[in-house]
Amino acid sequence: MNGGWYTSVGQAVDAVKKKIYDVARTALAEAGEDEVDVSMGYIWPAQWFDAVAVTAVRETPTDGTIGMQRRQHVDIRQDVAITTFRVTADEGEVHDRAYKILDIIDTVIRTDATLDGTVLWCYADDVASDGITAESEAGWGRICALSVTFTARAMITRPV
């Protein structure tokens, strides 16, 4: 890869989004998790009860100034939604499953925090859950939805 250096914000954001998608697909496949939908954005209808959706992405420059070389560090925040559903009354079953999927993806990213040279570094920065399935919404089962944000650092430099 390019060591996390890009000539435009568009290149950097696109590379991070695609790489996190690829990492999620590969990590789950290597873990034998072949009944998980992994997609760019949300898909419907879903094929499986478990899903990983690579969703919103945003970029912000860091606090440093741009020097004579016109280089600037940027933080790229990539959101990933993990949802699990089971026909069960056991809330713990869906939560355990969602966090297992997150653990598989996060472990691979932490093992190679540069995403194979795509960025300078990348880590899970924020994880949120909706809590529990309300009894009035439970219907035939339980669902767990995790919202995970991976933050990556890249360098934007002038075009050559």
Image (tube, helix red, strand yellow):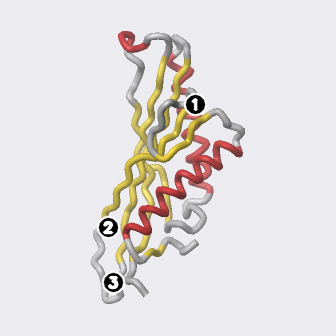
Q: Secondary structure at mark 2?
A: loop
Which of the pair 134/103 is nearer the observer?
A: 134
Q: Position of residue 115 (x, y in %)?
A: 56, 61
Q: Earlier in the sequence, mark 3 or mark 1?
A: 1
Q: Earlier in the sequence, mark 2 or mark 1?
A: 1
Instruction: Rate crowding at label 1 as few (under 14), some (14 to 19) or many (20 or more) other CA atoms within 10 Å.
Output: few
Q: Which mark is residue 62?
A: 2
Q: Quadrant of the C terminus?
A: bottom left
Residue tagged 1: 47
Tell whether 22 sits left or right of 54. Answer: right
How far is the residue under mark 3 from the one under mark 2?
A: 14 Å
Is 140 situated above or below 102? above
Q: Label 3 amino acid?
A: Arg
* Amino acid bearing label 2: Thr
- Which amino acid does the dot numbered 1 rest on? Gln
Name the outermost residue toward the front.
45
Comparing 151 with 86, the one in front is 86
Disc 2 residue crowd, few under 14, some 14–19, many 20+, Cα 10 Å: few
Q: Position of residue 88 (x, y in %)?
A: 55, 13
